[in-house]
Image: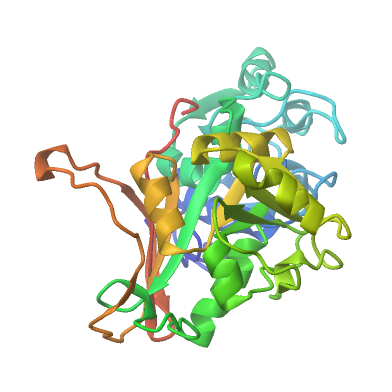
Amino acid sequence: MDIQYWIFDIQRSDRFVTELEAMHSAVQLAWGGWGRVAPNPLVGAVLLRDGEVIGEGYHAEYGGPHAEINALDGCDDPTGATCVVTLEPCAHHGKTPPCCDTLASAGVARVVAAISDPTPVAGGGLDRLREAGVDVDLGVGAAEAAALNAPFLFNAARHARPFVAVKVATSLDGFLADETGRSQWISGPEAREYVHWLRAGYDAIGVGRRTAVTDNPLLTVRGEVEPRVAPTRVIFTTVGEMPTDLNVLDTSDAPTTVVAASARVVELRQALAHTQVTVLEADDLEGSLAALGKQGIHSILIEGGGALIGALMDGGLVDRLYWIKAPIWLGKGIPAFGSLAAVPLEHARVWTVIDRRALGPDTLLAVDRELCLQGS
């Protein structure tokens, strides 16, 4: 299921369009709000009449019109139409009126939603539509829609920590750097462009102290999508020196947080007192993530290094993995996942593939540990 750039242009098709095909297109439309609508979910909508597309839209900006409203605005006459939408139309009056009421008053006869809205404030739109005499169906394309909004659904379940995604770019033999520690650049320009797009949709971008020191990255978004809110850069540290002139400690372009073990907190707060860097205290990874959650970080993209990624994987704290493989062979190097505990084959977790495609000469595989489908 290649969810992010699955090509399906139903508007230029002269054949009958099914509701499932329209849902695929609605998911693709929804990605247009990536980096711009959080903490709201990504939503796309397609209006059908007799198998023909008569309107489409997506939620493009936080506080702006929702997907259903944009689809209606592009339709001359929605009377009797079917609205295919990736998430249950909202039932509350927030920055915009309830979408369920607008659909009903516009004369839409049927609403097909992939998953229900799990939030107490916005949920209940399908019931309102039924009460208004609108035919309702739930569950079409549920897996694809759940992958689309995995961080939103994860946080709606009130987890104490953020949704954790890991991005690794490796050689064919699984190394993220050569034997000397050099990693720039294993992947090609298309993959690096994709990573900047990816960063735009997360609340934070995290690395371990060693990666921050060795690579001295900026960890900012420098792609086509300008995030509505710049992601917080996060450094996880337990031991070792941290130079105070690292690029990531310059907060003029984006905020930075350091999560440190209690033995290092006082020292780091003193060393960084002249900066705007926030220093949090936590003695394990689960506590570190919980501390970030209390700071309002609901999703984080971890980009290295191997020891941090391995510890997160071993702790069952990774919800999504983006693995970019470059067609090179190093033989020896820095392993992407550190030293992991062994798991017998019969007990190995099977992750769900949500995207698989080429990025120039490189290959992307994206997998989720589990899909949140209780809303389907």
Q: Residue at x 42, y 47 (%)?
A: 312
Quadrant placement of the N terminus: bottom left
| Whether residue 105 can be seen here | yes
**Figure label count:** 0
Task: State the image coordinates of residue 251 (x, y, percent, origin top left).
Answer: 83, 64
Compared to residue 117, the image places residue 133 above or below, namely above
Q: Residue at x 36, y 66 (%)?
A: 336
For this rendering, which residue is in front, 43 or 154? 154
Compared to residue 175, the image places residue 55 above or below, namely above
Q: Residue at x 84, y 47 (%)?
A: 64
Task: State the image coordinates of residue 98 (x, y, percent, origin top left).
Answer: 79, 28
Task: State the image coordinates of residue 269 (x, y, percent, origin top left).
Answer: 78, 50
For this rendering, which residue is in front, 35 or 342? 342
Give the colouring mode of the picture: rainbow
Compared to residue 168, the image places residue 157 above or below, namely above
| Whether residue 43 can be seen here | no
Is residue 48 shown left or right of residue 76? left
Task: State the image coordinates of residue 106 (x, y, percent, origin top left).
Answer: 77, 34
For this rendering, which residue is in front, 80 or 134? 134
For this rendering, which residue is in front, 27 or 251? 251
Question: Within the image, what quadrant is residue 337 found in?
Answer: bottom left
Is residue 254 shown left or right of residue 114? right
Q: Residue at x 50, y 52 (%)?
A: 165
